[in-house]
Each structure stands twice: as C-alpha cells, then as structure tokens.
Image (tube, helix red, strand yellow):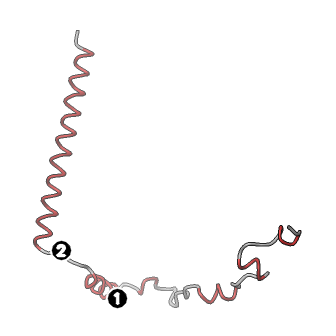
Amino acid sequence: MSEDQQHRPTGKRQLAGTATTSSAAYTAKRAPEPRDEDKPGGGVAAFPGEVVSEMKKVVWPTGKEMVQYTLVTFAFLIVLTALVWSVDTLTGLGVEAVLAP
C-alpha cells in the first residue's frame, strides 16, 4: 500500500477538500426574525382569532370513542385503587405483626 492510500480521507467532504456548506448558506436557511418585537405573539387583539384557528385544527373524538376512553379510564382507576389498597393492607398487617407482642 502506498503512503497516499493510507492517509486518504473517507468522507465526501474530505475528498473534495472543502466543506459543502458555508456560513452564508446556513444564515440564509435560518428562520426569519420576528418583525414586530413590541408585541410577541401578535398582541391581545390577535389572541381570539388564533384560538379559533387552533380549535379548527382539533380532531374531536366521536361519541363511541369518548365512551371507550371513559371506560378505560374507570377500569384503570379501579385497578390502581385495588393495588394501592392491597399494598396498604399488607403493609399494615406487616407492621402490626412486627410491633404487636
């Protein structure tokens, strides 16, 4: 193997000898700065319109989906309550066994 092949760069940028991006290209791709710095977000007057536009984007669940979500939530609460109750009961019995003569 020759000495040139041992020190040969492996990446495309290194083969060309220069980077493919420049600071000018990076600056051009950055998001534009906000124009009105006195009112970030457009001010109080723009808020209701923004709320309406965001509410139009919401995907509302159907009635059937809401029933399913409610049942799953209640089932989870029942299971979690039973778990906490059982751990509390067993811990109480263990403490009584240790402290009672």
Amino acid type at image mark 2 = Pro
Nearest the eye: 67 or 46: 67
* SS assignment at label 1: loop
Figure check: 19 above or below 64: below
- x and y percentages locating residue 7 in the rendered image: 83, 69
Indicate which label's residue lies in the foreground, 2 or 1.
Answer: 2
Answer with left or right where residue 44 lies relative to residue 21: left
Q: Return the residue found at the far top.
A: 101
Amino acid type of disc 1? Ala
Which is nearer the eye, 4 or 82? 4
Q: Which of 35 and 27 is in front in this view?
A: 27
Residue most extreme to the front: 1
Res. 85 mark: none
Q: In whole angstroms, how far apart are the C-alphas of marks 2 and 1?
A: 30 Å
Query: In the rendered picture of this protein, how many numbered marks are placed on residues?
Result: 2
Q: What element carries label 2?
A: loop
Q: Is residue 92 left or right of residue 23?
A: left
Residue 46 placement (x, y as % from top left): 35, 88
Q: Where is residue 77 in the image (x, y as percent from the top left)?
A: 18, 50
Residue placed at 62% from the left, 90% from the top? 28
Q: Which residue is labeled 1 in the image?
A: 45
Disc sitting over residue 61 in the figure: 2
* Label 2 CA crowd tier, 10 Å (few <14, some 14–19, many 20+): few
Task: Please name the residue shown 28% across and 83% down the image.
Answer: 57
The residue positioned 25% from the left and 27% from the top of the image is 91
Q: Can you say which quadrant of the picture contains the N terminus?
A: bottom right
Q: Quadrant of the C terminus?
A: top left
Res 3 quadrant in image: bottom right
User: Where residue 9 appears, x then y in whole percent?
Assistant: 77, 72
Residue 69, by quadrant, is bottom left
